[in-house]
Image: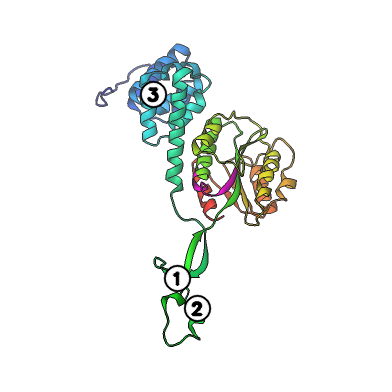
Amino acid sequence: MPSDDVPIVLSGTISDEKLFESEIRASGRDFQYYLRLGRTFDYPAAKQMAELAIEFGNVSALQALAQLQPIATSEAISSQNGVHLIARSAREGNVAAPLLFFQLRHQIRGKYRETFRKLARATIIHSALRISGRGLRPETIQNVPFHPGLNEFDLDATLEETLLKPEYVSYTDIVGIERVARRKIGTIILDTSGSMAGLKLLTAATAAAVAAYHLRHDKYALIAFNTVANTVKSMDQHTTIDSIVDTILDTEPAGYTNIADALKTAYTQYERSHRYESWAILITDGIANRGGSPEPFARKYQNLHVLQTPGTHPQGEETCQRIALLGRGRHIKVNSYTEVPRALIRLLRHT
């Protein structure tokens, strides 16, 4: 790694390539800056800058080049140095690994594609486990005969049991309290459409992993949709978190959003539960541009919650609010995609 102590002095007129190179070395700019500066680069220039970005560990510059010149960037990153950079980012919890995988998965070939896929999966699952945590599951309370190890007892029920007893009371007359984690039954519905394919798919993959981990002892279904809906995991299917994340990693993003088909497909899983406590969570920006109105399908649900992702059109918020109202659920809006996984876990902890 070159020393950071070497000063960079600029004077006179400087080309975009030289400026880009100096900013890579300084590592002080964000993705959007590199995107603007590198928009005129041809293949050789982009590949040279990508190699330099790998050398200096500048992930933001690399992501910008991946969007501008994916083939040139994939050539540069398909190397041991490229793998080492992304592996280091993955260990640090940086989302560079999955985002670069989504950007370059059609260009990267051979052993490097599978390596980047594994690093993307590992980053997503690590992030999901950190967000999900343990405990904080809804509980049911039931009275049971007292036995050693119980920490609580029901005073009122114990008094009722002992009122007519002789002058002495044994521990067998004590009514204990046992707290049991309530099993959940629900359906997660993920929107994978839209133009922000990399960030949106990363959010969907992380949300899917969060749900899979939190609901690992429960009964749940997972639906992903864009132009059409796809059942990632059915209600009765046993699937690993790795498999679920891989399915999202392989999802082809589409610009169309068919919420009606998503709710229709999800309902076939939702109605299998045969329990009034069952729920569904729809994660979308609400811009439905395929499949007609989702409202007739929303009316079929009880406890259909909507987690609204960022969007620029007011129609999206109106649609999300309407779906939640018809589905007798809650509507929660987040301001950025990074908030989605934690908002989902809050919802899951109260279902």
- Circle 2 or circle 3, nearest the eye: 2
* Label of residue 146 in the image: 1
Instruction: Please state the horizontal and vertical placement of residue 108, each as a whole percent of the image.
Output: 48, 19
Specify the segment rendered in magenta: 213-221
Residue 58 at least partly seen? no
Amino acid type for the residue under numbered disc 1: Phe
What residue is drawn where x is 49% and y is 56%? 137
For label 2, the SS is helix
- The image shows residue 320 at horizontal and vertical percentages of 65, 47
Residue 89, position in %: x, y?
A: 38, 31
Q: In which quarter of the image is residue 221?
A: top right
Task: Tell me how far mark 1 sits from mark 2, CA to CA.
Answer: 14 Å
Residue 77 versus residue 245 in the image, above or below: above
What amino acid type should be assigned to the residue bearing mark 2?
Answer: Asp
At 32% from the left and 20% from the top, the residue drawn is: 10
Q: Mark 3 points at which residue?
A: 83
Identify the residue shown where x is 40% and y is 15%.
Answer: 48
Q: Which residue is drawn at 44% across and 26% down?
A: 116
Q: Which quadrant of the figure contains the C terminus?
A: bottom right
Residue 244 location (% of width, % of height): 54, 36
